[in-house]
Amino acid sequence: MEMTKTLGEFIIDRQTEYPNATGALTSIFSSIRLASKVLHRQINKAGLVDITGAAGAENIQGEQQQKLDIFANEKFKTALAARGVVCGIASEEEDKYVNFEEGNTQEGEYVVLMDPLDGSSNIDVNVSVGTIFSIYRRVSPLGQPVTEADFLQPGNKQVAAGYVIYGSSTMLVYTTGNGVNGFTLDPSLGVFCLSHPDMQMPEDGKIYSVNEGNYINFPTGVKKYIKYCQEEDEATQRPYTSRYIGSLVSDFHRNLIKGGIYLYPTARSYPKGKLRLLYECNPIAFLAEQAGGKAISAPDQPIMDLKPSELHERTPFFVGSTKMVNKVEEFLREG
Ligand code: AHM
Ligand code: MG
């Protein structure tokens, strides 16, 4: 077997490209890598955990069995807290941000925002789920307690972002603003290997991904775009193909590789959209743009320019191949 570069080697190589690098980011990636391997192992036996948990969902010590999303949150939190370079995290699973430095004198320069187990409703049916993460430099002074403002930064301030997809194989895909690279876990070695160097999202695509069950309540522009996707036209190779897993990481990952668009507009149950700006949309938007794609919340409104006002803020989300996002933008503009 030809040995490819491991994620660890790749990060060290890249570090020399940044003259003032302190190694802190490398350390954060080590934490993420470790936690994702633990999660990979747990997800792979999720069906078995369900069997043993069936009788009252308690384990042998009489403790309540942890749901996998809580488990994921705890593992990532612990791994990120351990190295002293992250001053706090915000997570879809936590009401408030978590200060890692309470009662100690660490001087973590970075904050991490994450959705530890996105698409967790898919776990019960053995469908892919993911972890999404986003890394920022803190804006509050070092040595002071981390503040909410450290987390409420626009996506264009992200230092790095990525996801782990626990699919037919487990992959870690990330960017530090210098392209997108994908690594596949070799489970027998426990090592992520560079399998998808310099990922590029096709400029155009033929796949649209949306929960069409919400159609009746979609804005008019979105309804028209969906009809456009379904119409026959030889020149543009329509009708397009509809693919929707209901797991953002998996839907985005497929569209990143094959070309496509993912839409989560406003809907009756989600008047502001369903997806979270900080934990889901910003990191995915960063990856999309770094791979040559595009992400908006409305016409002429790039996701990463939005100024967040609260941690769990939601937004409509349109992300994918640039030409497809441009097209939906046209329809949204016309209303
Ligand atoms: P979650 O963070 O509660 O798992 O919700 C986010 C998920 C995304 O992964 C997915 O794209 C979307 O919700 C699916 O929503 P729906 O079931 O409404 O189509
Ligand atoms: Mg989520």
Image: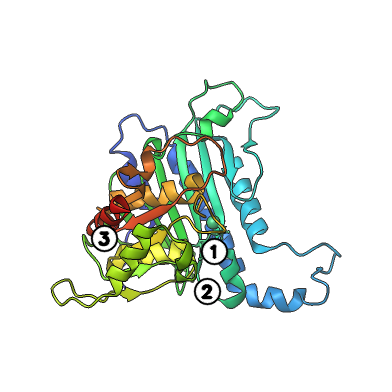
Spot occupied by residue 81 in the image (x, y as percentages of width and height): 61, 41
For residue 119, the mark is: 1
- Placement of 165 over or under 12, stated as above or below: below
Q: Residue at x 48, y 42 (%)?
A: 27
Q: Which residue matches tag 2?
A: 127
Distance CA(mark 2)–CA(mark 1): 9 Å
Q: Nearer the viewer, mark 2 or mark 3?
A: 3
Q: Amino acid at mark 3?
A: Met
- Extreme-left residue of the structure: 235
Q: Residue at x 43, y 71 (%)?
A: 244
Distance CA(mark 3)–CA(mark 1): 24 Å
Q: Which residue matches tag 3?
A: 324
Instruction: Report the side of 323 relative to 164 (left or right).
Output: left
Q: Earlier in the sequence, mark 2 or mark 1?
A: 1
Mark 1: secondary structure: loop
The answer to whether the residue labelled 2 contacts the one labelled 1, judged by CB atoms less than 8 Å apart, is yes
Looking at the picture, the colour scheme in use is: rainbow
Instruction: Report the side of 289 relative to 307 (left or right).
Output: left
Q: Does any portion of residue 193 appear in the rendered image?
A: no
Quadrant in which residue 71 is drawn: bottom right
Crowding near pointer 1: few (<14 within 10 Å), some, many (20+)?
Answer: many
Mark 2: secondary structure: loop
Q: Nearer the viewer, mark 3 or mark 1?
A: 3
Q: Earlier in the sequence, mark 2 or mark 3?
A: 2
For residue 35, the mark is: none
Spot occupied by residue 110 in the image (x, y as percentages of width and height): 49, 34
